[in-house]
Image (cartoon, rainbow, N blue to C red):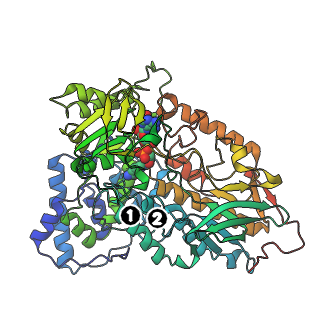
């Protein structure tokens, strides 16, 4: 697989073009054609997406508007073909902004334009690439960075560090790259962010097989990135980082690793980037009698392919995002399927969730210059602040546990209706899957109707009475009913709040990171922690999202910031930077206040966003724009700068 597919000249007949346009997403179509031809009059005001309807399919454009836009597009593409597919004229910055305003329905705040330009990437320039290298900033100075993990954010970090000419070593406990996309192989596993925006901004892929592709396609993408970024040389597979210890005299980190064959080694580095992810250590809840169960059990993230579920009585504990993806498939195979739901999930109607990208749309991506770029930009904008306004708590709203504002209540009504209309013959069952907490207090799961259809199958039974115990024969519910099972599948999530475990991290004065956190992980901008100089977390505390953006976008911001920190050190001639306690603490106060004002912080519903102390340790409560602005450049005032105390020049590393 290769990421780059140059746009092909159009040689097809009018009818082929017309047919392809039928499957177009219309809002990005006219901006792409205006970009291609330089004819801004194509941006007809009457065909502009409705800013209020931007999240609706086709941006709220009526069928008539869509047809008019398609007809206009057909004329333009036929002319473009007949003229021999001439190169596009250069557009001014101002013109590009006009195209963005049109795509977003005109509702765009000035501040978003620079980062939308990054997302658009229409000039093919990798805007996130470092504009400096070690040779230009501190020639001859050794600077090695150890990256822990070769998942999505580790690959990204390694690529950027390499672009800056730094010495990189990546330690990966698995035998392959991909992180979560390598480990989660359960049937039905797929991305729940539109795939055309779930990719690095600088390594787009236009030919995703599905709007929301499956795990195999995602894993393939990350493997291809590693090949194209030429990173294989610096990744050490089957090598787990056991601990990282800061040496104050040398201002370096000693990274202690263990290979899968048991061999141990210490590697010195000037900085450590933890890219270990959050959702990879399975959470198996303690349930009375679970060890007595006679049959096999496994966790969704450790799917056991040796166990044939066909004709078996299967029990699934949990109804989160993973369960919602594999349960419909298991229901096809199992003779009986019992689903143990503790808390119902909200579902967002997404009709195209399982659909392949139609061939006409694939053709447009492959033949119409700029169409895929504007499509990405449109998708990004739709999801940028997404449902954030619907998740904000209105302090004047009478909190009844069911909603947090009028807008949230309105969303609740819509999502409730979506559930109820799918259970016309069994409203009692429908009522059991209507959550009793506000939408956005937990992650909203995408759905194309398959969840309700599965629950109404004859061989599927939803158990909501709670689990009393597990017996050798199955699961006993709290109402005393025994549910016999041959296999139990735990879809019970991950120990997400145990950030960076089981790795041991020791900073200045022997401070242990896990003792410091004491189960309540915090960091400045999710990345730096006082007393842990040059130790950076990606996807660290409070960098997760609930209803907007994508984790890839957050990681790109974080890596940009980390590179900025390294540059700062190199320019200053300092060895390390250590986050100031007051800066870190004040920041976390703001974060906590922000989260309290959001549905996920205000609601008492249990979720993996909260740690054992009940604090929201996962989520970023503000806009994407704010995270983007805060991560453009480190402020030197936020840090204390350290020099190596040994006479030895900083960075003399053992070979
Ligand atoms: P999860 O959302 O944490 O769901 C865990 C489920 O197990 C919940 O229904 C939970 O119930 C239940 N559970 C936990 N302990 C239990 C117990 N003792 N008894 C009964 N039920 C119990 O985990 P997940 O489904 O693996 O998803 C985790 C996150 O991974 C998602 O939020 C999402 O961010 C990510 N994810 C993404 C995708 C995707 O992009 N395609 C797919 C899967 C996962 P309660 O709700 O009552 O706690």
Quarter, ligand 1:
top left
* Furthest residue toward left: 15
Report whether 251 appears left or right of 514: right
Label disc, if present, on residue 218 of the rendered structure: 1
Secondary structure type for disc 2 = loop
Label disc, if present, on residue 178 of the rendered structure: 2
Indicate the position of residue 583 as horizontal and vertical percent values.
Answer: 72, 45
Cα gap from disc 2 to disc 1, whole angstroms: 8 Å
How many discs mark residues in the rendered view?
2
Indicate the position of residue 25 as horizontal and vertical percent values.
Answer: 24, 56
Which residue is depicted at the point 51% across and 29% down? Answer: 602
**Label 2 close to label 1 by CB (< 8 Å):** yes
Q: Quarter-wise, where is residue 169 in the image? A: bottom right
Q: Height in image: 612 above or below 276?
A: above
Q: Height in image: 546 above or below 354?
A: above
Indicate the position of residue 569 as horizontal and vertical percent values.
Answer: 74, 65
């Amino acid at each position: 697989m290769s990421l780059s597919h140059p746009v092909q000249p159009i040689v097809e007949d009018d009818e082929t073009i017309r047919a392809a346009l039928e499957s177009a997403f219309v809002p990005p179509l006219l901006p792409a054609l205006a970009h291609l031809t330089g004819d801004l009059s194509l941006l007809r005001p009457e065909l502009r997406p409705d800013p209020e309807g931007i999240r609706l399919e086709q941006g709220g454009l009526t069928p008539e508007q869509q047809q008019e836009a398609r007809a206009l597009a057909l004329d333009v593409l036929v002319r473009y073909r007949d003229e021999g597919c001439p190169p596009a004229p250069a557009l001014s910055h101002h013109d590009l902004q006009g195209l963005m305003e049109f795509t977003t329905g005109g509702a765009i705040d000035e501040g978003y334009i620079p980062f939308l330009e990054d997302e658009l990437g229409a000039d093919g320039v990798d805007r996130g690439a470092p504009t400096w290298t070690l040779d230009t900033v501190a020639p001859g100075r050794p600077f090695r960075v150890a990256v822990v993990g070769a998942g999505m954010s580790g690959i990204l970090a390694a690529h950027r560090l390499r672009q800056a000419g730094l010495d990189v070593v990546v330690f990966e406990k698995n035998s392959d790259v991909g992180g979560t996309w390598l480990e989660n192989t359960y049937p039905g596993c797929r991305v729940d962010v539109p795939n055309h925006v779930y990719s690095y901004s600088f390594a787009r892929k236009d030919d995703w097989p599905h709007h929301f592709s499956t795990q195999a396609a995602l894993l393939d993408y990350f493997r291809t990135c590693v090949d194209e970024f030429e990173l294989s040389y610096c990744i050490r597979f089957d090598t787990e980082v056991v601990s990282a210890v800061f040496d104050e005299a040398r201002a370096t980190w000693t990274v202690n690793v263990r290979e899968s064959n048991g061999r141990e080694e210490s590697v010195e580095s000037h900085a450590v980037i933890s890219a270990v992810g959050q959702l990879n250590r399975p959470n198996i809840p303690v349930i009375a009698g679970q060890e007595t169960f006679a049959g096999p059990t496994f966790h969704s993230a450790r799917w056991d392919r040796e166990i044939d579920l066909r004709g078996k009585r299967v029990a699934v504990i949990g109804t989160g995002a993973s369960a919602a993806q594999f349960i419909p498939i298991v229901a096809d195979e199992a003779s009986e399927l019992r689903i143990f739901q503790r808390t119902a999930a909200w579902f967002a109607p997404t009709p195209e969730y399982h659909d392949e990208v139609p061939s006409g749309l694939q053709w447009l991506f492959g033949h119409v210059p700029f169409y895929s770029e504007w499509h990405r930009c449109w998708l990004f904008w739709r999801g940028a602040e997404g449902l954030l306004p619907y998740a904000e708590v209105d302090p004047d709203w009478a909190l009844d546990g069911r909603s947090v504002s009028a807008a949230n209540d309105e969303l609740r009504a819509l999502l409730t209706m979506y559930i109820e209309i799918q259970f016309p013959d069994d409203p009692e069952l429908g009522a059991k899957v209507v959550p009793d907490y506000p939408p956005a207090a937990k992650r909203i799961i995408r759905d194309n109707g398959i969840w309700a259809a599965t629950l109404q199958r004859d061989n599927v039974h939803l158990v909501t009475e709670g689990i009393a115990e597990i017996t050798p024969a199955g699961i006993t519910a709290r109402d005393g009913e025994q549910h016999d099972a041959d296999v139990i599948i735990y879809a019970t999530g991950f120990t997400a709040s145990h950030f960076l475990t089981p790795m041991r991290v020791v900073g200045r004065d022997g401070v242990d990171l896990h003792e410091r956190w004491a189960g309540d992980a915090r960091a400045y901008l999710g990345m730096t922690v006082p007393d842990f100089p040059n130790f950076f977390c990606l996807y660290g505390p409070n960098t997760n999202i609930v209803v907007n953006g994508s984790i890839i976008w957050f990681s790109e911001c974080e890596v940009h910031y980390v590179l900025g920190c390294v540059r700062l050190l190199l320019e200053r001639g300092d060895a390390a930077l250590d986050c100031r306690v007051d800066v870190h603490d004040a920041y976390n106060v703001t974060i906590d206040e922000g989260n309290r004002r959001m549905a996920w912080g205000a609601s008492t519903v249990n979720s993996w966003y909260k740690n054992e102390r009940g604090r929201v340790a996962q989520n970023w409560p503000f806009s994407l724009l704010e995270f983007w602005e805060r991560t453009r450049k480190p402020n030197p005032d936020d840090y204390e700068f350290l020099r190596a105390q040994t006479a030895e020049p900083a960075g003399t590393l053992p070979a």
